[in-house]
Image (spheres, rainbow, N blue to C red):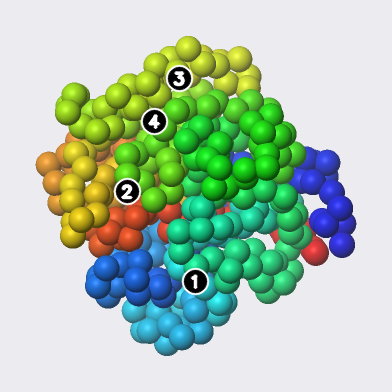
Protein backbone atom coordinates (compact mmCIF):
# COMPACT_ATOMS: atom_id res chain seq x y z
CA UNK A 1 0.00 0.00 0.00
CA UNK A 2 1.57 3.25 -1.13
CA UNK A 3 0.02 5.09 1.84
CA UNK A 4 2.23 3.19 4.26
CA UNK A 5 5.46 4.43 2.67
CA UNK A 6 4.73 8.01 1.67
CA UNK A 7 3.40 11.22 3.19
CA UNK A 8 0.41 13.23 1.96
CA UNK A 9 2.66 16.13 0.95
CA UNK A 10 4.89 13.82 -1.09
CA UNK A 11 1.74 12.75 -2.93
CA UNK A 12 0.53 16.32 -3.43
CA UNK A 13 -2.15 16.47 -0.70
CA UNK A 14 -2.77 18.93 2.14
CA UNK A 15 -5.51 19.71 4.63
CA UNK A 16 -8.15 22.17 3.38
CA UNK A 17 -9.79 24.72 5.65
CA UNK A 18 -12.96 23.76 7.50
CA UNK A 19 -15.01 26.21 5.41
CA UNK A 20 -13.96 24.53 2.13
CA UNK A 21 -16.70 22.41 0.48
CA UNK A 22 -17.57 19.22 2.34
CA UNK A 23 -18.62 15.81 1.14
CA UNK A 24 -20.07 15.06 4.58
CA UNK A 25 -19.51 15.22 8.36
CA UNK A 26 -18.50 12.49 10.81
CA UNK A 27 -19.95 12.28 14.34
CA UNK A 28 -19.45 9.52 16.96
CA UNK A 29 -22.49 8.59 19.07
CA UNK A 30 -21.95 8.82 22.89
CA UNK A 31 -21.21 5.44 24.45
CA UNK A 32 -18.93 5.99 27.49
CA UNK A 33 -21.26 6.52 30.45
CA UNK A 34 -18.51 7.86 32.74
CA UNK A 35 -17.82 10.81 30.43
CA UNK A 36 -21.16 12.40 31.21
CA UNK A 37 -21.44 12.26 35.04
CA UNK A 38 -24.92 10.79 34.98
CA UNK A 39 -26.11 12.89 32.04
CA UNK A 40 -25.48 10.62 29.05
CA UNK A 41 -29.18 10.73 28.09
CA UNK A 42 -29.02 14.52 27.90
CA UNK A 43 -25.77 14.36 25.95
CA UNK A 44 -27.27 11.94 23.44
CA UNK A 45 -30.26 14.21 22.99
CA UNK A 46 -27.98 17.18 22.29
CA UNK A 47 -25.82 15.14 19.91
CA UNK A 48 -29.01 14.29 18.01
CA UNK A 49 -29.89 18.00 17.76
CA UNK A 50 -26.39 18.87 16.52
CA UNK A 51 -26.63 16.11 13.90
CA UNK A 52 -30.05 17.34 12.76
CA UNK A 53 -28.70 20.89 12.47
CA UNK A 54 -25.78 19.75 10.31
CA UNK A 55 -28.10 17.63 8.15
CA UNK A 56 -29.76 20.88 7.05
CA UNK A 57 -26.55 21.59 5.16
CA UNK A 58 -24.85 18.27 4.33
CA UNK A 59 -24.92 14.50 4.98
CA UNK A 60 -23.78 13.18 8.38
CA UNK A 61 -22.22 9.74 8.96
CA UNK A 62 -22.78 8.66 12.56
CA UNK A 63 -20.26 6.19 14.00
CA UNK A 64 -21.92 4.01 16.61
CA UNK A 65 -20.73 1.31 18.95
CA UNK A 66 -22.65 -1.89 18.11
CA UNK A 67 -24.18 -1.73 21.61
CA UNK A 68 -25.78 1.69 20.93
CA UNK A 69 -26.72 1.20 17.27
CA UNK A 70 -30.43 0.58 17.94
CA UNK A 71 -30.70 3.55 20.29
CA UNK A 72 -28.97 5.91 17.86
CA UNK A 73 -31.20 4.79 15.03
CA UNK A 74 -34.28 5.51 17.17
CA UNK A 75 -33.11 9.02 18.12
CA UNK A 76 -31.96 10.16 14.68
CA UNK A 77 -34.04 11.07 11.60
CA UNK A 78 -35.07 8.29 9.23
CA UNK A 79 -32.40 7.64 6.63
CA UNK A 80 -29.49 8.72 8.83
CA UNK A 81 -26.31 6.91 7.84
CA UNK A 82 -25.04 4.86 10.81
CA UNK A 83 -21.67 3.10 10.68
CA UNK A 84 -21.09 0.39 13.32
CA UNK A 85 -17.56 0.62 14.71
CA UNK A 86 -15.98 -0.15 18.09
CA UNK A 87 -15.62 3.03 20.17
CA UNK A 88 -14.31 4.06 23.58
CA UNK A 89 -15.83 7.56 23.54
CA UNK A 90 -17.42 10.13 21.25
CA UNK A 91 -14.93 12.88 20.35
CA UNK A 92 -14.36 12.21 16.64
CA UNK A 93 -12.53 15.51 16.13
CA UNK A 94 -9.70 14.18 18.28
CA UNK A 95 -9.53 10.44 17.63
CA UNK A 96 -10.87 10.28 14.09
CA UNK A 97 -9.11 10.72 10.77
CA UNK A 98 -7.91 14.08 9.48
CA UNK A 99 -8.75 14.46 5.81
CA UNK A 100 -6.45 15.87 3.15
CA UNK A 101 -7.06 16.58 -0.52
CA UNK A 102 -5.16 17.20 -3.76
CA UNK A 103 -5.45 20.18 -6.13
CA UNK A 104 -7.59 17.97 -8.40
CA UNK A 105 -9.95 17.21 -5.49
CA UNK A 106 -8.96 13.65 -4.56
CA UNK A 107 -9.40 12.91 -0.84
CA UNK A 108 -7.40 10.73 1.57
CA UNK A 109 -7.08 10.47 5.34
CA UNK A 110 -4.26 10.97 7.82
CA UNK A 111 -4.19 8.67 10.83
CA UNK A 112 -2.46 10.42 13.72
CA UNK A 113 -2.01 8.39 16.88
CA UNK A 114 -4.50 9.05 19.70
CA UNK A 115 -3.82 8.50 23.41
CA UNK A 116 -6.89 10.14 25.03
CA UNK A 117 -5.24 13.49 25.81
CA UNK A 118 -2.31 11.93 27.63
CA UNK A 119 -3.93 8.61 28.70
CA UNK A 120 -6.76 10.24 30.68
CA UNK A 121 -9.30 7.56 29.67
CA UNK A 122 -9.52 4.33 27.62
CA UNK A 123 -8.47 4.86 24.00
CA UNK A 124 -7.38 1.65 22.22
CA UNK A 125 -10.65 1.32 20.26
CA UNK A 126 -10.76 5.04 19.45
CA UNK A 127 -7.18 4.98 18.21
CA UNK A 128 -8.18 2.26 15.72
CA UNK A 129 -11.14 4.19 14.24
CA UNK A 130 -9.25 5.74 11.27
CA UNK A 131 -7.94 2.35 10.18
CA UNK A 132 -11.41 0.84 10.46
CA UNK A 133 -12.97 3.66 8.44
CA UNK A 134 -10.24 3.38 5.81
CA UNK A 135 -11.22 -0.25 5.29
CA UNK A 136 -14.98 0.36 5.38
CA UNK A 137 -14.88 3.33 3.01
CA UNK A 138 -11.95 2.14 0.84
CA UNK A 139 -10.00 5.37 1.30
CA UNK A 140 -6.25 5.77 1.38
CA UNK A 141 -4.80 6.13 4.89
CA UNK A 142 -1.49 7.77 5.79
CA UNK A 143 -0.36 6.62 9.26
CA UNK A 144 1.49 9.46 10.99
CA UNK A 145 4.25 8.74 13.55
CA UNK A 146 3.01 11.20 16.18
CA UNK A 147 0.11 11.87 18.57
CA UNK A 148 -2.19 14.68 17.45
CA UNK A 149 -5.83 15.59 18.07
CA UNK A 150 -7.91 17.52 15.58
CA UNK A 151 -9.08 19.99 18.21
CA UNK A 152 -5.50 21.02 18.94
CA UNK A 153 -5.01 22.95 15.72
CA UNK A 154 -6.75 25.10 13.12
CA UNK A 155 -5.65 25.55 9.49
CA UNK A 156 -6.44 28.31 7.02
CA UNK A 157 -6.15 26.09 3.92
CA UNK A 158 -3.46 28.45 2.69
CA UNK A 159 -0.43 26.96 4.43
CA UNK A 160 -0.86 28.25 8.00
CA UNK A 161 -1.61 26.27 11.17
CA UNK A 162 -2.60 27.70 14.56
CA UNK A 163 -1.97 25.74 17.77
CA UNK A 164 -0.87 26.03 21.41
CA UNK A 165 2.41 25.22 23.08
CA UNK A 166 0.51 23.93 26.11
CA UNK A 167 -0.94 21.05 24.11
CA UNK A 168 1.46 20.11 21.32
CA UNK A 169 4.60 20.48 23.44
CA UNK A 170 3.06 18.62 26.38
CA UNK A 171 5.18 15.65 27.49
CA UNK A 172 2.12 13.39 27.63
CA UNK A 173 1.78 13.47 23.82
CA UNK A 174 5.11 13.25 21.99
CA UNK A 175 7.77 13.24 24.68
CA UNK A 176 10.37 11.92 22.27
CA UNK A 177 9.86 14.71 19.72
CA UNK A 178 11.32 18.21 19.74
CA UNK A 179 9.39 21.30 18.67
CA UNK A 180 11.25 21.26 15.36
CA UNK A 181 10.34 17.60 14.78
CA UNK A 182 6.67 18.27 15.61
CA UNK A 183 6.62 21.15 13.15
CA UNK A 184 8.18 18.91 10.49
CA UNK A 185 5.53 16.25 11.10
CA UNK A 186 2.73 18.79 10.75
CA UNK A 187 4.28 19.99 7.51
CA UNK A 188 4.68 16.48 6.06
CA UNK A 189 1.21 15.21 6.96
CA UNK A 190 -0.99 18.32 6.79
CA UNK A 191 0.87 20.32 4.16
CA UNK A 192 1.30 23.45 6.27
CA UNK A 193 4.22 25.79 5.74
CA UNK A 194 3.98 28.03 8.80
CA UNK A 195 2.91 27.30 12.37
CA UNK A 196 1.68 30.06 14.68
CA UNK A 197 2.19 29.06 18.31
CA UNK A 198 -0.12 30.47 20.95
CA UNK A 199 0.64 29.91 24.62
CA UNK A 200 -2.31 28.31 26.39
CA UNK A 201 -5.86 27.15 25.90
CA UNK A 202 -8.64 27.30 28.47
CA UNK A 203 -7.83 26.79 32.14
CA UNK A 204 -8.71 23.39 33.68
CA UNK A 205 -9.16 21.86 30.21
CA UNK A 206 -8.93 18.06 30.00
CA UNK A 207 -7.36 18.43 26.55
CA UNK A 208 -4.37 20.40 27.90
CA UNK A 209 -5.14 23.51 25.93
CA UNK A 210 -6.79 22.69 22.61
CA UNK A 211 -6.79 25.72 20.37
CA UNK A 212 -10.46 25.22 19.43
CA UNK A 213 -11.31 26.55 22.87
CA UNK A 214 -9.59 29.90 22.33
CA UNK A 215 -8.99 30.74 18.65
CA UNK A 216 -9.64 29.57 15.10
CA UNK A 217 -9.14 30.68 11.54
CA UNK A 218 -12.43 31.86 10.04
CA UNK A 219 -10.97 32.77 6.63
CA UNK A 220 -7.44 33.27 5.27
CA UNK A 221 -5.76 36.03 7.24
CA UNK A 222 -8.56 36.21 9.84
CA UNK A 223 -8.59 34.64 13.31
CA UNK A 224 -11.54 34.64 15.68
CA UNK A 225 -10.26 34.81 19.25
CA UNK A 226 -11.97 34.47 22.63
CA UNK A 227 -11.68 37.51 24.87
CA UNK A 228 -13.01 38.66 28.23
CA UNK A 229 -13.04 42.05 29.94
CA UNK A 230 -13.19 40.41 33.36
CA UNK A 231 -9.71 40.71 34.90
CA UNK A 232 -10.71 38.14 37.54
CA UNK A 233 -11.46 35.49 34.93
CA UNK A 234 -8.82 32.70 35.24
CA UNK A 235 -8.38 32.85 31.47
CA UNK A 236 -7.91 36.61 31.22
CA UNK A 237 -4.10 36.71 31.21
CA UNK A 238 -3.63 33.77 28.84
CA UNK A 239 -6.24 35.08 26.39
CA UNK A 240 -4.58 38.50 26.33
CA UNK A 241 -1.16 36.89 25.86
CA UNK A 242 -2.48 34.86 22.92
CA UNK A 243 -3.95 37.97 21.37
CA UNK A 244 -0.66 39.84 21.80
CA UNK A 245 1.18 37.08 19.94
CA UNK A 246 -1.26 37.18 17.03
CA UNK A 247 -1.04 40.95 16.74
CA UNK A 248 2.59 40.63 15.63
CA UNK A 249 2.24 37.48 13.52
CA UNK A 250 1.92 36.95 9.78
CA UNK A 251 0.56 33.91 7.98
CA UNK A 252 2.27 31.63 5.45
CA UNK A 253 1.52 34.16 2.70
CA UNK A 254 3.06 37.02 4.68
CA UNK A 255 -0.27 38.64 5.54
CA UNK A 256 -0.90 40.31 8.89
CA UNK A 257 -3.56 38.57 10.97
CA UNK A 258 -6.89 40.36 11.36
CA UNK A 259 -8.33 39.56 14.81
CA UNK A 260 -12.04 39.23 15.53
CA UNK A 261 -12.96 39.15 19.23
CA UNK A 262 -15.75 36.93 20.48
CA UNK A 263 -17.06 36.98 24.04
CA UNK A 264 -15.55 34.52 26.53
CA UNK A 265 -18.12 33.47 29.19
CA UNK A 266 -17.09 32.99 32.80
CA UNK A 267 -16.15 29.45 33.86
CA UNK A 268 -18.70 27.68 36.03
CA UNK A 269 -18.46 24.72 38.38
CA UNK A 270 -20.58 21.58 38.18
CA UNK A 271 -20.11 18.85 40.79
CA UNK A 272 -16.49 19.87 41.29
CA UNK A 273 -15.85 20.11 37.54
CA UNK A 274 -14.77 23.46 36.10
CA UNK A 275 -16.57 24.11 32.80
CA UNK A 276 -15.64 26.95 30.49
CA UNK A 277 -18.28 27.52 27.82
CA UNK A 278 -16.95 28.92 24.57
CA UNK A 279 -18.18 30.01 21.16
CA UNK A 280 -14.96 29.31 19.26
CA UNK A 281 -16.08 25.67 19.50
CA UNK A 282 -18.52 25.90 16.58
CA UNK A 283 -18.69 23.96 13.30
CA UNK A 284 -18.80 25.20 9.68
CA UNK A 285 -20.71 22.87 7.31
CA UNK A 286 -21.61 23.75 3.71
CA UNK A 287 -23.44 27.07 3.70
CA UNK A 288 -23.94 27.14 7.45
CA UNK A 289 -22.53 27.47 10.95
CA UNK A 290 -23.68 25.29 13.84
CA UNK A 291 -23.02 27.29 17.00
CA UNK A 292 -23.33 26.50 20.71
CA UNK A 293 -25.64 28.23 23.11
CA UNK A 294 -25.58 27.76 26.88
CA UNK A 295 -28.64 29.60 28.17
CA UNK A 296 -26.56 32.56 29.38
CA UNK A 297 -26.66 36.29 28.52
CA UNK A 298 -23.51 36.06 26.40
CA UNK A 299 -25.27 33.79 23.87
CA UNK A 300 -26.94 36.60 21.92
CA UNK A 301 -23.77 38.69 21.51
CA UNK A 302 -21.77 35.64 20.41
CA UNK A 303 -24.37 34.59 17.82
CA UNK A 304 -24.42 38.17 16.52
CA UNK A 305 -20.63 38.03 16.12
CA UNK A 306 -20.78 34.70 14.31
CA UNK A 307 -23.43 36.00 11.93
CA UNK A 308 -21.25 39.01 11.16
CA UNK A 309 -18.13 36.90 10.57
CA UNK A 310 -19.93 34.29 8.48
CA UNK A 311 -22.26 36.71 6.72
CA UNK A 312 -22.65 34.41 3.71
CA UNK A 313 -23.80 31.45 5.85
CA UNK A 314 -26.85 30.58 7.91
CA UNK A 315 -26.02 30.41 11.63
CA UNK A 316 -27.99 27.78 13.58
CA UNK A 317 -27.56 27.51 17.35
CA UNK A 318 -27.97 24.38 19.47
CA UNK A 319 -28.06 24.18 23.26
CA UNK A 320 -25.13 22.06 24.47
CA UNK A 321 -25.27 22.25 28.27
CA UNK A 322 -24.83 18.49 28.61
CA UNK A 323 -22.14 18.13 25.95
CA UNK A 324 -19.95 20.63 27.82
CA UNK A 325 -20.17 18.45 30.95
CA UNK A 326 -18.33 15.78 28.97
CA UNK A 327 -15.48 18.20 28.31
CA UNK A 328 -16.11 19.49 24.80
CA UNK A 329 -18.39 21.23 22.37
CA UNK A 330 -19.82 21.12 18.87
CA UNK A 331 -16.44 21.35 17.15
CA UNK A 332 -15.14 18.49 19.30
CA UNK A 333 -17.88 16.08 18.21
CA UNK A 334 -17.63 16.74 14.46
CA UNK A 335 -15.09 16.11 11.70
CA UNK A 336 -15.42 17.39 8.15
CA UNK A 337 -14.85 15.20 5.09
CA UNK A 338 -13.73 17.35 2.14
CA UNK A 339 -15.65 17.17 -1.10
CA UNK A 340 -14.19 14.91 -3.78
CA UNK A 341 -13.60 11.29 -4.74
CA UNK A 342 -11.73 9.06 -2.31
CA UNK A 343 -8.29 7.87 -3.30
CA UNK A 344 -8.37 4.07 -3.11
CA UNK A 345 -6.29 2.22 -0.56
Going from N to C along the chain, the mark reached first, 1 or 3, is 1
Residue 246, label in figure: 3
The residue at which mark 1 appears reads as 88
Please state, as top left, top right, bottom left or bottom right, where the C terminus lies in the image: bottom right
| Residue visible at 46% across and 86% down in the picture | 67
Residue identifier under label 4: 224
Q: Which residue is mark 2?
A: 291
Q: Earlier in the sequence, mark 1 or mark 4?
A: 1
Marks 1 and 4 sit apart, C-alpha to C-alpha, by 32 Å
Marks 1/4 in contact by CB < 8 Å: the verdict is no
State which quadrant residue 175 falls in.
top right
Which residue shows up at 24% across the image and 33% down it?
A: 234
The residue closer to the viewer here, 287 or 333, is 333
**Front position among marks 2 and 3:** 3
Please rate how many residues cluster around mark 2, counting C-alpha atoms within 10 Å: few if below 14, some from 14 to 19, many from 20.
Answer: many
Residue 163 vs residue 279, the one in the foreground: 163
Amino acid sequence: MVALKRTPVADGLCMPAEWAPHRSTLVSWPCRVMSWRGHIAGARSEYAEVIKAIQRFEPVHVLTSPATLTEARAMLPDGSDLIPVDLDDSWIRDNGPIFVSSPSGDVAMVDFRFNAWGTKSPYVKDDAVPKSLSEKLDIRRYPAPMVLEGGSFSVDGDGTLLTTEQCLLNGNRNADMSRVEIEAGLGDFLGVKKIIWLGQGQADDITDGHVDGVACFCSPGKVMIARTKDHHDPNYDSLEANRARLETETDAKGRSIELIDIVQPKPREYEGLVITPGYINHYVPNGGVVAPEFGIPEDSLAIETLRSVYSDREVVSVHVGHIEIGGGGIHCITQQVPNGPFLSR
